[in-house]
Amino acid sequence: MKLMKSLLVAVLALIAGVATAQTPKKPSAPGKKPPQKAAQQYGCTSYMKAPAVTAAFDTSSGRGLADPYYLWDNGAVLRVKFLSGSSEMKFKVLSYAKEWEQFANVRFEFVESGDADIRVNLDNKGGHNSVIGQLATGVPQDVKTMNLDTTDFKTYESMHGTVMHEFGHALGLLHEHYSPLAGIPWNKELVYKELGQSQGWDKLTVDVNLFQQYSLTYTQGTSYDRKSIMHYPVLARWTTNGYSVPWNNYLSDGDKSLISALYPKGGARSTEKPRFFITDFTSMNFKESADKGGLLIYPSFRIKTQGAEGQVYFTVFFYDENGNPLMDNNDKYNISNVVATYKSFKFQAGKILTANKAAPDDFEMFIPYSELPVTPGTKIKMVFRAILVDGEELKWFFNSTPVNFSLKK
Ligand SMILES: [Zn+2]
């Protein structure tokens, strides 16, 4: 396995948690003691939730304000379905979300049944979060891709701001305060303390939600926008120089121009990245082969390729029954020393390909017994992941649920 190590550290960072976005509860007013239970969710949890099985990977590498690898096609019609909620609330969400259509060449089509691209849970719990852009295609159809918590929807402003923010994530936008141009001089210890008390956030959650920074290439050429709907509020006491950002509840001029550039009306995007997505991941069968001396693995999925040509790595990682990665450093069948196998392909855009769908066992992955450092009968787990490589960029775009098994060999 010859994947570069730095590359893989980056992949693993992605695996550990960059992709749903989270909206925190509203913090107390400056000068007041933070309440035990805050009145409104502060921010949102829209990074992709860490999978059930991960190692403790570096999570410091963040990615763009709009992620060009997770955008939908320009002109996309996105089917949106509510999994819950009153008709009054649904109508409001729908009418607010559609404001994006004035500036973006996308359309939200609300549907009552059938498959949907964006699936909204709308009840009185769970805070606010959304999967980023087209990563939603990798989420099973019976699972929500967005959560909206009506307990925060007491005023027009707070509901409008939250709905616009979450649908911004659904279109591929990321948090504005992650901009490398923001330069916010955080008073980190105080922020850890206060959000720990008011939101129950641990240090890592605060780091991921507030302090990470994306690389400059992801700003899409835009400048830092303090008024962006995608910016969290920043209390003056949270910065060393009194810098603050209020609750932004309306699209800023910057939001409008950014989304128009990403989804241009009457033209194509100025640049396209490879955008690959897995759908219909239904199973990962496997069998032991005495002949071949190892484990044969058959993930079943479709892959959709869009945007531009790119390289994909289909990987299977191995863990013990507690979710700790099986480690191996012999430089074969491991990725960043985690036992794994992979197959790599270069794909052009505009394809839909299937694995183990059209014919049984037409896509096989393999790992020899000698590379699995466990004795027969030991319970282990494997996870399928798809990773896009585009030059120096490395984007995780699919992560399966773990498959549990034990080797007989
Ligand atoms: Zn957010």
Image (cartoon, rainbow, N blue to C red):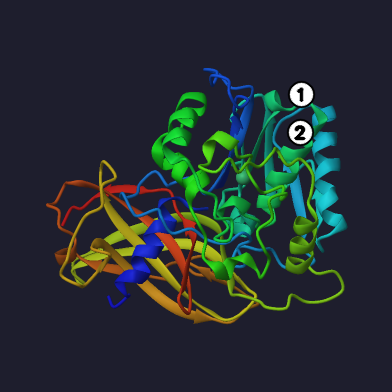
Which residue is the site of mark 1?
Answer: 154
Left or right, residue 149 beside residue 310: right
Label 2: which secondary element: helix
Q: Quadrant of ligand 1?
A: top right
Q: Residue furthest front?
A: 241
Identify the image quadrant of residue 85: top right
274 and 238: which one is in front? 238
Residue at 22% over, 54% down? 326
Can you give x and y, in whole percent of width and height, for residue 234 in the image? 60, 40
* In this picture, residue 389 sits left or right of residue 278: left
Whole-number angstrom distance, CA of label 2 to CA of label 1: 7 Å
Q: Are the two marked residues, 2 and 1, in contact with CB atoms closer than 8 angstroms?
A: yes
The reply to whether residue 243 is visible in this rendering is yes
Q: Earlier in the sequence, mark 2 or mark 1?
A: 1
Locate the C terminus and report the quarter of the image it occupies.
Answer: bottom left
Few, some or many C-alpha atoms within 10 Å of disc 1 (few <14, some 14-19, many ≥20)? Answer: few
Q: Residues within 10 Å of mark 2 (few under 14, many from 20)?
A: many
